[in-house]
Image (cartoon, grey):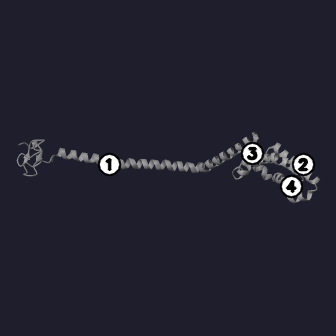
Amino acid sequence: MENNKITQICPGCGAAIPEQGTAICPYCGRELIDLSREHTDQKIEEVKRAQKKTTAVPKRLGLVVAATLFVLFAVFALVLFLDVPDKIQEARMQGAMDKLSRDMEKAYKDEDWDQLEQYLIDECEDYIGAPDYFLYRTAWFLHTYPPLFDEACQTHDTEEMLWIYETLAEDYNMRDDDIFFRIYETDDTIEAALKEEVERETKILTEEGLEDEMYKLRR
């Protein structure tokens, strides 16, 4: 029997099995195990390949996690560098203010005084932040109060006359502060009309002998 033909040794009886591919020992009937070098090397390579595949998954996962963290860090750093949160908030607030202004402007141009009253009086806490709030409030005052003042004057309702005068005079007096014009938008036509109305009512109240009451109101 030639040695190069012996590829298996029976683990039961120890007999040399010369034929390849034999699964059962022809001498004792024991199941054979392939102990050849070629078979052993093949199994070792299979194990190595399986190990490589197993270790490759954590490595790829680690690379993905590292790359993701790097991108997130870069984005976060860019956000801080560009001051993006503040700019987004600022843009959002500016958009809200622009909408409030558009609401009031539309009501004013449409001469929808009831709607304008809702914005200026009923929803004052929302609209007062708009830079043109006082512009439209003054316009509404000038539309609403002068006719009421004249009616009170005809009926000699002194209390009503003084209350309307005080309302318009306080609105007019705000213009004495330069900060007002730096913060709020104004309209030359409305400003001139307000000045004219306050002077007109001042004259009427003076003629009615209410100068002292006017002085108390404007102190």
Number of residue marks? 4
The residue at the point 68 percent across, 44 percent down is 99
* Residue 175 x %, y %: 82, 51
* Residue where numbered disc 4 is placed: 162
Which mark is nearer the camera, 1 or 2? Answer: 2
Which of 207/173 is in front? Answer: 207
The residues bearing labels 1 and 2 have C-alpha atoms spaced at a distance of 93 Å
Q: Amino acid at mark 2?
A: Arg
Q: Which mark is residue 54?
A: 1
* Residue 26 x %, y %: 6, 45
Using the rendered image of the protein, determine whether residue 159 is visible from the camera's viewpoint. yes
In the drawing, does residue 115 fall left or right of residue 58? right
Secondary element at tag 3: helix
Pointer 2 with pointer 4, Cβ within 8 A? no
Q: Which mark is residue 200?
A: 2
Mark 4 or 1 closer to N-term?
A: 1
The residue at the point 57 percent across, 49 percent down is 79
- Tell me the quarter of the image containing the C terminus: bottom right
Q: Amino acid at mark 3?
A: Asp
Mark 1 or 2 closer to N-term?
A: 1
Secondary element at tag 1: helix
In the drawing, does residue 168 fall left or right of residue 208? left
Q: Residue furthest front?
A: 155
Pointer 4 with pointer 3, Cβ within 8 A? no
The residues bearing labels 3 and 1 have C-alpha atoms spaced at a distance of 75 Å
Q: Amino acid at mark 1?
A: Thr
